[in-house]
Each structure stands twice: as structure tokens, then as C-alpha cells.
Amino acid sequence: MRIFLISFIVGLSFQALGVSSPVNFEISHIENQQVFFKVPEGGAPMAPLTIQIYDASPIGILPPNSNSETFLLLEGKSCKDCNEFKQVFLISLSGKQQSAVTYPGSIRRKKTGKKVFEGRLFYGDCLGKGKQVVVSHQKEKVRGRRYLQPAVLVLEPTEGQLKEQLIIRRRSRPSLRRIIRRTRGKNKKCTEIKGISRKSQDKLVPAGALRWIPPTQKS
């Protein structure tokens, strides 16, 4: 049994991102694949959210866009007691929408030390359009290419779904420098998830790098 006594005050998180808070709650802890919430005194109680994620711990909260849900950002694995790399999961408060992207940082081949993936991951109003998104600036080793293939993956919560856009063309890719600027200062709009270094025995990156893991829809 693994318990994380880490709390995120949603109101404060929203304030840091420069948006108003539509709800006011905290993530109290995660236990036995359930996320428990804490509400202010006098607030309506929130039922635990069941998740299909192992070794989960909270990263942050993505405020809702117009007609979309609030999303929790958690790190963890999709399998129990396995050697899978941990990923960043996006889970709606209703539990009906769940997606995952590769954890930021770098992945190198264990035998040769050659880099097969590198990426930086951000969430919040990172593109300057007033919309809450998750943005992955990344490069991946692709068969038939000598160099790492650059791309930008954008996930945007919309009504009933997570809109996904993979941008490969150089002129169309959002500027990494501009995104980084929005993570700084007193009125920062965007937050970066700190990356980690990993080594892989596979020749190519495990599933979920340039290609995202499709949402799991619950009935």
C-alpha cells in the first residue's frame, strides 16, 4: 500500500496560472489506486476517483477551458510491478477521459548511450491563447532518419474530449523560447514538469513519445 500525502490547493494553482478557480478542493492523497480529495469546511464532499495507474503521485492540475472538465496531472505506470517507464497521465475529474504522454527528459540506448528521445513538457496557458493545454516539445529517433525527429504535441481539453495535435512542420511548431518565458515571473501562466534521464534496452522509444496514448473512454 502506497500513500502520497501531497496536497495541491486548486485555487492557489489557478491563481498562479492567472485564471479564476471554478472549484475549490485539494488532492489529499492517493491510496490503492484511488485519489482522495479534501474540500473546504462547508463544501460539498467529493467522492474518491478510481484510477488505473500504479505508483501514482500528483503533478498538478489543469483548469478547465470553456465547456471542458478540470484535469488532474499524475505520474505513474499503466502496469503493476513492471519495468515500464513512468508517464504523465491526464485524468478528468469525472474519470471518463484519460490519456498519457511520455515523461519529459531524455532516453538513451543502454548499450550505445545514444539518445533516442528528449523532451520538455509544460501545462497551463502555455501558448498565449488563453486556453489550458499540455505541450510536449520533443525529439525522437525514427527509423530511416539519421537525426532525432522534432515535433510538438499539444493536448487541449474540449467539450467531451481531449483534442490532440501533433505538429511536425518547423514553421508551424510553437516556439519553445516563448513557452519558457511564460513559466517565469510573478504572473506566470505556464508550468514546466522537470525531466529525468533514463536508459532503454529497446532500439526505439517505447510507445507514447511522438505518438500519444489514445484516451480510454469509460462507459
Image (tube, rainbow, N blue to C red):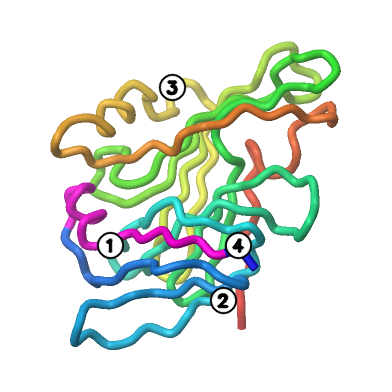
Label 4, label 2: how far apart the Cα atoms are: 16 Å
Helix, strand or loop at disc 3? helix
The quadrant of the rendering that contains the N terminus is: bottom right
Question: Does the magenta segment cover residue 14?
Answer: yes
Residue that carries the numbered disc 2 in the rendered image:
50
Kind of residue indicated by mark 4? Pro
- What residue do we see at 22% from left, 70% from top? 22
Tell me the tag on residue 148. none
Q: Earlier in the sequence, mark 4 or mark 3?
A: 3
Percent from the top left, x then y, of residue 31?
56, 70
Amino acid type of disc 3?
Arg
Report the disc number at residue 215: 4
Q: Nearer the viewer, mark 1 or mark 4?
A: 1
Please report the residue visible at 75 percent of the width from the left and 17 percent of the height from the top.
Answer: 145
* Kind of residue at disc 1: Val
Q: Amino acid at mark 2?
A: Thr
Residue at which label 1 appears: 10
Query: The magenta stretch spans which residues?
Result: 3-19
Say whether residue 113 is left or right of residue 139.
right
Q: Nearer the viewer, residue 122 or 150?
A: 122
For disc 3, the neighbor class at 10 Å (few under 14, some 14 to 19, many from 20) is few
Vertical arrangement, residue 200 with respect to residue 97, above or below: above
Judging by the rendered image, the residue that carries numbered circle 3 is: 171
1 and 4 marks in contact (CB < 8 Å): no
